């Protein structure tokens, strides 16, 4: 059995993960006695690795790519937001021995947008680039903030349209290909594609911008992403990457596990400096 409480992040690749640093800072800040490690786990190893972790007394797991859908199926019980996202990034061992699956990604994004960036979401027009799992995971929490509408644009129009249809009862959601975007500006543009990390600028134009447009990339890196460089070149003043989202979703996992909410601002600042 593990003593003190042990947590970990599973993924592949995993060596780049900042999660151990984040949770170490949370634990120091809140006086929690815990250990947090990272473990390289491939999809075919996932079920056994999870079972062994919890059988040995592990208390909780964070799950990153490409394992979130597998974690969704592994959990005994799902929160509403995990059910909505169709993916799980947090597993918790319950007192009765069952495993709870949650998804804190959307919550983390919304908290970063509202609390750290101080950007409004209510009654705003939002454009989201991409229609993969990362975008599905944040749609529910974004719609809960009552924007005027969300437009999902994707290279494969059908995928965007299907995703929009799946969330249509929660608010005004439209899906299309990049070539069918309306000639109107958006208050917020969120990049949920991997194009930025590959150095590609998004296939959108200045027609989607207005004077108060803010641009947010769910990815992050040491240097500004391709999407944020594009936004800067267009004169967009309000720009942010996904480091804050990473810390905020981790804080929600920490709260779920430990019952205490850590301060995120000093952790974000420390990661920026490092």
Image (spheres, rainbow, N blue to C red):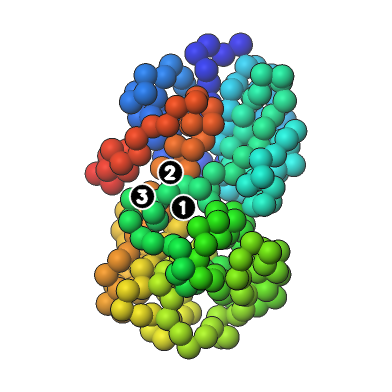
Kindly identify the residue that appears in the image at 61 percent across and 75 percent down: 174
Give the quarter of the image for residue 150: bottom right
In the image, residue 251 above or below residue 149:
above
Q: Is residue 220 visible?
A: no
Q: Which residue in the protein does label 1 denote?
A: 109
Give me the disc on residue 248: 2
Asked whether the residues under the numbered discs 1 and 2 touch, taking CB atoms below 8 Å apart as contact, a structural biologist would say yes
In the image, residue 133 above or below residue 123:
above
Say which of 252 and 47 sits in front. 252
Q: Position of residue 115 (x, y in %)?
A: 36, 50
Q: Is residue 189 left or right of residue 12?
A: left
Q: Position of residue 127 (x, y in %)?
A: 49, 72
Kindly identify the residue that appears in the image at 52 percent across and 17 percent down: 5
Q: SS at mark 3?
A: helix
Can you name the residue that lies furthest to the bottom here? 183
Say which of 175 and 8 sits in front. 175
Kindly identify the residue that appears in the image at 42 percent across and 31 percent down: 261
For marks 1 and 2 on the same chain, the one whose residue lies earlier in the sequence = 1
For marks 3 and 1 on the same chain, the one whose residue lies earlier in the sequence = 1
Query: Disc 3 to disc 1, how far (Cα)?
Result: 10 Å
Q: Is residue 184 left or right of residue 42?
A: left
Asked whether the residues under the numbered discs 3 and 2 touch, taking CB atoms below 8 Å apart as contact, a structural biologist would say yes
Say which of 88 and 260 sits in front. 260
Position of the N terminus, as image quadrant, is top right
Asked whether the residues under the numbered discs 3 and 1 touch, taking CB atoms below 8 Å apart as contact, a structural biologist would say no
Q: Which residue in the protein does label 3 denote?
A: 115
Say which of 147 and 116 sits in front. 147
In the image, residue 215 above or below residue 48:
below
């Amino acid at each position: 059995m593990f003593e003190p409480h042990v947590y970990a992040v599973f993924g592949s690749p995993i060596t780049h993960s900042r999660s151990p640093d984040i949770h170490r800072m949370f634990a120091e800040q809140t006086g929690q006695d815990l250990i947090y490690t990272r473990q390289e786990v491939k999809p075919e190893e996932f079920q056994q690795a999870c079972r062994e972790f919890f059988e040995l007394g592990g208390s909780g797991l964070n799950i990153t790519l490409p394992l979130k859908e597998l974690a969704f199926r592994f959990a005994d019980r799902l929160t509403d937001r995990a059910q909505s996202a169709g993916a799980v990034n947090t597993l918790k061992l319950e007192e009765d021995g069952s495993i709870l699956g949650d998804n804190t990604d959307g919550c983390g994004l919304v908290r970063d947008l509202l609390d750290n960036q101080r950007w409004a979401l209510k009654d705003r027009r939002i454009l989201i680039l991409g229609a993969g799992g990362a975008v599905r995971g944040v749609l529910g929490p974004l719609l809960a903030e009552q924007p005027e509408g969300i437009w999902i644009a994707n290279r494969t129009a059908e995928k965007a349209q299907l995703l929009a249809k799946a969330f249509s009862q929660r608010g005004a959601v439209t899906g299309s290909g990049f070539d069918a975007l309306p000639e109107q500006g958006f208050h917020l543009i969120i990049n949920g594609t991997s194009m930025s990390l590959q150095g590609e600028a998004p296939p959108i134009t200045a027609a989607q911008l207005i004077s108060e447009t803010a641009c947010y990339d769910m990815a992050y890196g040491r240097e500004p992403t391709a999407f944020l460089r594009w936004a800067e070149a267009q004169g967009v003043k309000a720009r942010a990457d996904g480091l804050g989202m990473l810390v905020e979703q981790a804080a929600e996992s920490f709260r779920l596990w430990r019952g205490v909410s850590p301060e995120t601002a000093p952790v974000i600042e420390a990661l920026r400096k490092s």
